[in-house]
Image: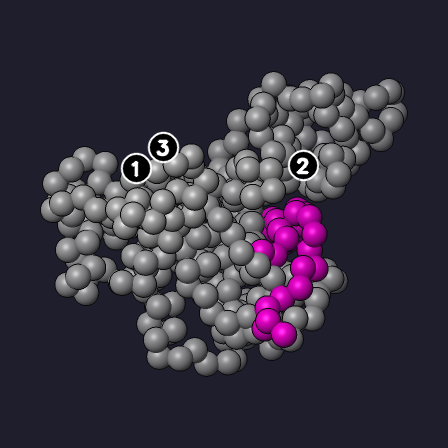
Amino acid sequence: MEGIVLRSINNIYSVRSDQGDVYSCRIKGKQLAQAKGEYNPIVVGDVVDFTLSGEGSSEGLVTFRHDRRSEFSRWNDKRSLNQTICANMDVVVCVCSVESPPFRPRFIDRVIACCKSVPVMIVLNKCDILLTEDELERFELYKKLGYQTASVSAETGENVERFVKMLEGKTAAFVGQSGVGKSSLINRILGTDQRVGDLNAKYNRGNHTTNHALMLDGPGFTLIDTPGFREISVPHDDPHLVAQSFPEFVKASAKCAYDGCLHVNEPDCEVRRLVEKGKINADRYESYLRMLDTMEDRLPVWGRNWGRKCSKGQQ
């Protein structure tokens, strides 16, 4: 039988068959052949083959994972592995907030870099609170770069209907910092009662309320709610993949002197030239450099030959 994973908790997977029945499944054997060396072999959104434990049983064994057409992943520091959070969505909705927690564009940049083969929509929650002029300029920059954006209020319902129309016909994974109101927004959209947490007053950031990814059906669309992140690290091993997540860099790199320019120390770099002239946002560029620094920290000393830390003699 073939089905889609709706939920994953402690290596137990809720799988919905093509007929609409939901089964509780485990992986057959120790490991799936398609998932060697991965932190979590099966995630919400995966399409899998499974067999029932017996005739009429509500339990089964997953035997095969189909290829993923898209992924949202991060680096797991504890296991030192890339960790996929969810798969096979049509769009990743990065939910951010105006305050409590504050607007953090560099977090948004990292979310974008964590996406593979899937577009990103940036949704500003708590829009009844005003951004500062600099924050508004930074938020509007994403739209200029080609990203879909929306401003909503889960509390008042402002612009939520308009946002819902943007989701029609799609499977959308909601990701964001803890406390931005991701679950509150989903509750508003679906009329559900996902658990909502209070803010950590000391650090002005959210406490985790969603502790596992969950697929939820809506009228004409599907949502994947994911755990909130306090911090997120890009999953890639190749720094060029991070550079490709900055569309303004991709456009400018055609004029760089060297193929595969990472826009760090290379001479005649068009990206750095445009940053210096104010035509590429300096904070976006700094956000990119910090991602490279994080990736470089994972490498052995002898492998640190492309980041700015080496050029500064810090390693």
**Residue 35 is covered by the magenta coloring:** no
Residue 182: x, y in percent? 60, 62
Is the C-beta separation of discs 3 and 2 under 8 Å? no
At horizontal 13% and vertical 45% (from top left) the residue drawn is: 267
Mark 1 is surrounded, within 10 Å at the Cα level, by few (under 14), some (14 to 19) or many (20 or more) other residues, namely few
Q: Is residue 73 left or right of residue 253?
A: right
The disc at residue 302 is 3
Q: Nearer the viewer, residue 287 or 216?
A: 287
Mark 3 is surrounded, within 10 Å at the Cα level, by few (under 14), some (14 to 19) or many (20 or more) other residues, namely few
Q: Looking at the rendering, which quadrant does residue 155 occupy? A: bottom right
| The C terminus, quarter of image | top left
Residue 95: x, y in percent? 52, 61
Q: Choose the circle earlier in sequence order: 3 or 2.
A: 2
Q: Secondary structure at mark 1?
A: loop
Point out the frontmost of discs 3 and 2.
3
Is the C-beta separation of discs 2 and 1 under 8 Å? no
Note whether 239 is above or below 57 in the view shown: below
At horizontal 86% and vertical 20% (from top left) the residue drawn is: 54
Residues drawn in magenta = 202-229
- Determine which residue is flagged by label 1: 305
The disc at residue 5 is 2
Spatial distance from mark 1 to mark 3, Cα to Cα? Answer: 7 Å
Point out the frontmost of discs 2 and 1.
1
Disc 2 marks a residue whose amino acid type is Val
Note whether 66 is above or below 123 in the view shown: above
Q: Secondary structure at mark 2?
A: strand
Disc 1 marks a residue whose amino acid type is Asn
Residue 68: x, y in percent? 52, 31
Mark 2 is surrounded, within 10 Å at the Cα level, by few (under 14), some (14 to 19) or many (20 or more) other residues, namely many
| The N terminus, quarter of image | top right
Spatial distance from mark 3 to mark 2, Cα to Cα? Answer: 41 Å
Q: Is residue 301 left or right of residue 285?
A: right
